[in-house]
Image (spheres, helix red, strand yellow):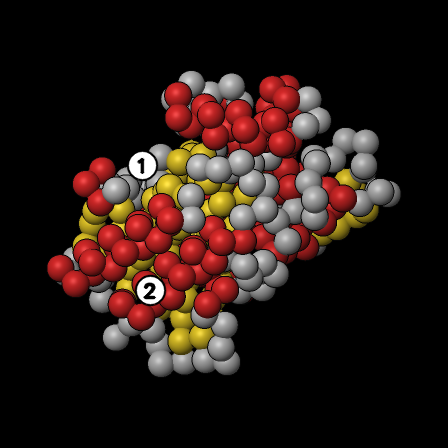
Amino acid sequence: MSTRLAYVASDPALLAVAESVAADWERVGARGHLLARNIDTGEEFGFDADTLVPLASVIKVAIALAVLDRTAAGTLDPAYQVTISPGTRSLGPTGLGAFRYPATLAVGDLVHQMLTVSDNAAGDTLLDLVGIDEVNRSLRAWNCPGIRIRHRLHRYYECAAGAAGNDFGIALGLAIQDDRSGSHTIEILDTAHANVGSATALVDLLQRVWLDQISQPSATAELRRIMALQVFTQRLSSDLRTDTVRVSGKTGTFLHLRHEIGVVETDSDDRIVIAALTRSTRRASIAADIDLAIGAAARSAFEALRR
């Protein structure tokens, strides 16, 4: 496997860590893209980090920053109330996407829902408020060419249902089969049509958020605060949860895609930013071993890159 991957490492010892992570992922039936970087020293390692990948819910970080940038600038009121109705909301297993009755939330709380429990209905409500073109315009203005949004979050379900009806087991099989053939039955898994980004672009984005080098300080501070409240702990933080280590992250999951990006911080001021973007090579809707392999990669990155 090592001969097929484009490795990056700022130090020969880190190359060995990257190769070990890639081998671990292959053993559990996953392929993917990784970049880990010490925010303060610049040391980094990874593999296939510049490849564009369909991002699933990881794209919500970019949506959140665009919304928070506007609330910081005063052009969008974080207290503005929006009512979401079951008949028109986007689908999703968590948050408003699973609500049975109309609910009214403020913009600021919609951002919280979108990031902490990966609420698709909250995400699309915010995306509709700001607009896809406006989010992309912000990304261009911030010099983030490696991240692009093309569709609402509900589009994932529309495309899967269009290809496989309501049988997401069939859709999962198609996704894995199409990965091998390179021809995508489910359109939003094709990087020509998907919301996309690379591990490098996502690490660069989070590094700038943590250094207040993008948008406005109040917006980046709020993004850091909410990302630290993510409720899902089965990936990046699975092997890192202690009283002295904090993980702020965002997962992305759709069919065979299992992603997470985030920042690991310690009381001793270590700050490691990680993007782990994986896709399963086997037909399993539940793959705890892949989640744990992402956690093991994060632990390896933390141990290798901390000062």
Q: Residue at x 45, y 75 (%)?
A: 245
Q: Position of residue 202 (x, y in %)?
A: 38, 47
CA separation, marks 1 and 2?
22 Å
Q: Position of residue 201 (x, y in %)?
A: 34, 44
Q: Nearer the viewer, residue 93 or 155?
A: 93
Q: In this view of the protein, can residue 292 be seen by the observer? A: yes
Can you tell which quarter of the image residue 127 is in? top right
Q: Secondary structure at mark 2?
A: helix
The residue indicated by pointer 1 is 51
Q: Position of residue 290 (x, y in %)?
A: 47, 51
Asked whether disc 1 touches disc 2, contact meaning CB atoms under 8 Å apart, the reply is no
Direction from residue 109 to residue 208 in the image, left or right? left
263 lies above or below 161:
below
Q: Secondary structure at mark 1?
A: loop
The residue indicated by pointer 2 is 300
Q: In this view of the protein, can residue 212 be seen by the observer? A: no
Q: Residue at x 16, y 63 (%)?
A: 13
* Three-letter amino acid code at the position of disc 1: Thr
240 lies above or below 253:
below
Sequence-wise first label, 1 or 2 = 1
Q: Kindly report which numbered mark, 1 or 2, lies closer to the viewer in this rendering.
A: 2
Q: Position of residue 136 (x, y in %)?
A: 45, 34
Q: Quadrant of the N terminus?
A: top left
| Residue extending furthest toward the left | 12
Q: Residue at x 84, y 42 (%)?
A: 100
Q: Residue at x 47, y 58 (%)?
A: 292
Q: Nearer the viewer, residue 236 or 286?
A: 286
